[in-house]
Amino acid sequence: MSNPEPQRSISPISKFIFASRWLQLPLYLGLILAQCVYVFHFWVELTDLVGAAMGNEAALQHIFAAVAVPNGPVPTKLNETTIMLVVLGLIDVVMISNLLIMVIVGGYETFVSRMNLDVHPDQPEWLSHVNASVLKTKLAMAIIGISSIHLLKTFINAGAYDGKTLMAQTGIHVVFLLSALAIAYTDRIMIGTQNQSKQSH
């Protein structure tokens, strides 16, 4: 019967270096504060939209100023396009908020400390198998979604932009798409290599 291997003691310098991961905690707390700002901004915009729909003049002016584009005409009435632009802005805030949650929760779980949420009924589905690779892919997809919202808002107001601006924003969006595809392809190669290594052993 083989003797169990003695546990190796961790050197003080290793403990210190490993404990340095807690330096990221203030960063995640800062992102939580940023999340609070986004929640406040969302409710301000939503309140203005509801007020504008009910005929509040101050809310109408705020909505018109919010959806106006540089060097473009300022809306004069609350029509379908104006409402759509405001709603797209709200969706943009929600998607950025989702991105923040993924960075805060997934980043903390991956790089700082386990949260032990296995028995929590509200544990996000993606958190059960989160790692640096999964988090990277999900962040890329979230960024593409945010870019899509901004591109759609630009196309709705296409008449206020020149061709170079439209092409530049479309090109940036395409770069985001290609980057996400490259990340997903790289992860697929890495997973395949890891599976082959396990099978060979």
Image: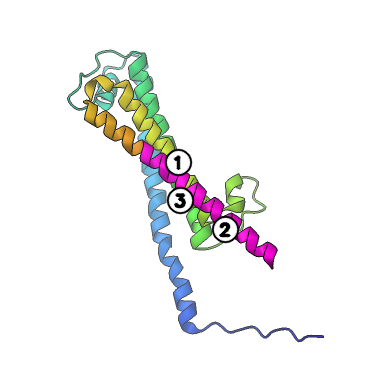
Residue at the spot 24% in from the left edge and 31% down from the top edge: 165
Q: Amino acid at mark 2?
A: Met
Residue matched to label 2: 115
Q: Secondary structure at mark 3?
A: helix
Residue at the spot 61% in from the left edge and 58% down from the top edge: 116
Magenta-colored stretch includes residue 70:
no
Q: Earlier in the sequence, mark 1 or mark 2?
A: 2
Quadrant showing the C terminus: bottom right
Residue matched to label 3: 103
The image's colouring method is rainbow
Residue 76 x/y as whole percent: 24, 14
2 vs 3, front mark: 3
Magenta-colored stretch includes residue 188:
yes
Relative to 201, residue 168 above or below: above
Residue 138 in sight here: yes
Q: Main secondary structure of the magenta part?
A: helix
Contact flag, marks 3 and 1 (Cβ < 8 Å): no
Residue at the spot 51% in from the left edge and 48% down from the top edge: 185
Relative to 48, residue 21 above or below: below
Residue 63 x/y as whole percent: 29, 23
Q: Amino acid at mark 1?
A: Ala
The crowd level at tag 2 (other Cα within 10 Å; few <14, some 14-19, many 20+) is: few
Alpha carbon separation for disc pair 2 and 3: 14 Å
3 vs 1, front mark: 1
Q: Secondary structure at mark 2?
A: loop
Q: Which residues are magenta?
A: 174-201
Q: Earlier in the sequence, mark 2 or mark 3?
A: 3
Residue matched to label 1: 142
Relative to 167, residue 184 above or below: below
